[in-house]
Image (tube, rainbow, N blue to C red):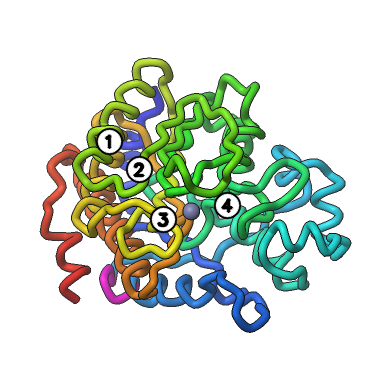
């Protein structure tokens, strides 16, 4: 098994902070009334800098055509790049095409790719955006243009860094694009825990789908997650996990339909990171969705994830087991 601890000991000068990749300076020009929460990305970066002074902020690199082609049809990459999307294709994505939209979409994938490389070196890393799991090989949907997790998983394999990748998608919406792109790929395991009655209304088939009824709260959610992780690890041995830590299962989300509390979501993050850490598996985290009635709630959920990840990175760097991460770290964000 790939051992990132030995990599860190081989490079003792490695900064013990958490690498965080940002692309929020590519602001989309959106029409008035558009529901995409553009400002959340800047707020998450600013909040993360305040909550974690040792955060190692890195600008997201852009993904090349060749890298995108690992998961996308050349015709789709070309249409997005040249601004040849039809009105229907733009409606399906949910925001209009612009040069900045094309650039931001490439950077968002590039951030998850860089995040995977950093996680393989440091144990854990975060993309302060990404999680664009509704993007298919040949079209976009639901605010997603390119599928960052599918591209990044395939690129890590192409670079011969890993053979097997798991995508653990805990955004409240099913990772339909991811499931479809990777449907016949046994080397990437797709797990999606999502709201049964939520978008997308026609679900795809992941390697493991857990569909939750409306109003699901902390305890049944976490029991379902524990069971799903155990099932995944009994069937598959990933060398890297790409974790989509959506904020939209939160009870204050406009679109989520579930009832997770802040504490429940922090426990969710720890459950994923502890399960991975106990097996020595690096984790690359993408923020994914979050549409709080109060945007501050969405930002708080994302910051909790970053704080839990930073705590985890510190423990890994110090050679301590990653389990038993303190409850106080995530609570600190909520009280800030
Ligand atoms: Zn979502």
**Mark 4 or mark 2, earlier in chain:** 2
**Mark 3 or mark 2, earlier in chain:** 2
Q: Which residue is mark 4?
A: 132
Q: Quadrant of residue 126?
A: bottom left
* Disc 3 residue: CB within 8 Å of ligand 1: yes
Residue visible at 50% across and 31% down in the picture: 190
Q: Nearer the viewer, residue 211 or 124?
A: 211
- Mark 3 Cα within 10 Å, few/some/many (few <14, many 20+)? many
Please state which of the two labelled residues, at mark 4 or mark 1, is closer to the viewer: 4
The answer for how far apart the CA atoms under marks 4 and 2 are is 22 Å
Q: Secondary structure at mark 2?
A: loop
Residue 51 spot, x, y in % from top left:
26, 71
Q: Is residue 21 above or below residue 180?
A: below
Q: Which residue is mark 2?
A: 123
**Magenta span of residues:** 49-53
The answer for how far apart the CA atoms under marks 3 and 2 are is 30 Å
Are the residues tagged 4 and 1 within 8 Å (C-beta)? no
Are the residues tagged 2 and 1 within 8 Å (C-beta)? yes
Q: Secondary structure at mark 1?
A: helix
Q: Nearer the viewer, residue 201 or 168?
A: 201
The answer for how far apart the CA atoms under marks 2 and 1 are is 8 Å
Identify the disc placed on residue 277.
1
């Amino acid at each position: 098994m790939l051992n990132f601890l030995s990599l860190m000991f081989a490079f003792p000068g490695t900064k013990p902070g958490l690498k965080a990749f940002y692309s929020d300076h590519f602001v989309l020009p959106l029409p008035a009334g558009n529901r995409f929460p553009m400002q959340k990305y800047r707020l998450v970066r600013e909040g993360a800098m305040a909550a974690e002074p040792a955060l190692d902020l890195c600008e997201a690199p852009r993904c090349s055509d060749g890298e995108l082609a690992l998961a996308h049809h050349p015709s789709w990459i070309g249409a997005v790049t040249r601004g040849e999307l039809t009105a229907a294709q733009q409606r399906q994505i949910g925001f209009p095409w612009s040069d900045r939209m094309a650039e931001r979409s490439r950077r968002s994938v590039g951030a998850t790719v860089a995040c995977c490389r950093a996680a393989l070196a440091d144990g854990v890393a975060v993309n302060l955006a990404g999680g664009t799991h509704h993007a298919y090989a040949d079209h976009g949907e639901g605010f997603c243009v390119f599928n960052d997790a599918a591209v990044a998983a395939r690129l890590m394999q192409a670079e011969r860094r890993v053979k097997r990748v798991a995508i653990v998608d805990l955004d409240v919406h099913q990772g339909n694009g991811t499931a479809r792109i990777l449907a016949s790929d046994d080397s990437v395991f797709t797990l999606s825990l999502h709201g049964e009655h939520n978008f997308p209304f026609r679900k795809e088939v992941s390697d493991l789908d857990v569909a939750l009824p409306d109003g699901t709260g902390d305890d049944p959610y976490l029991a379902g997650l524990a069971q799903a992780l155990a099932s995944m690890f009994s069937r598959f041995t990933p060398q890297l996990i790409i974790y989509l830590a959506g904020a939209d299962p939160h009870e204050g989300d406009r679109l989520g339909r579930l009832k997770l509390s802040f504490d429940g979501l922090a426990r969710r993050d720890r459950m994923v990171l502890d399960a991975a850490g106990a097996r020595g598996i690096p984790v690359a985290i993408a923020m994914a969705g979050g549409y709080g009635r109060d945007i501050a709630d969405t930002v708080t959920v994302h910051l909790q994830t970053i704080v839990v990840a930073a705590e985890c990175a510190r423990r890994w760097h110090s050679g301590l087991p990653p389990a038993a991460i303190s409850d106080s770290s995530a609570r600190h964000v909520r009280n800030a």
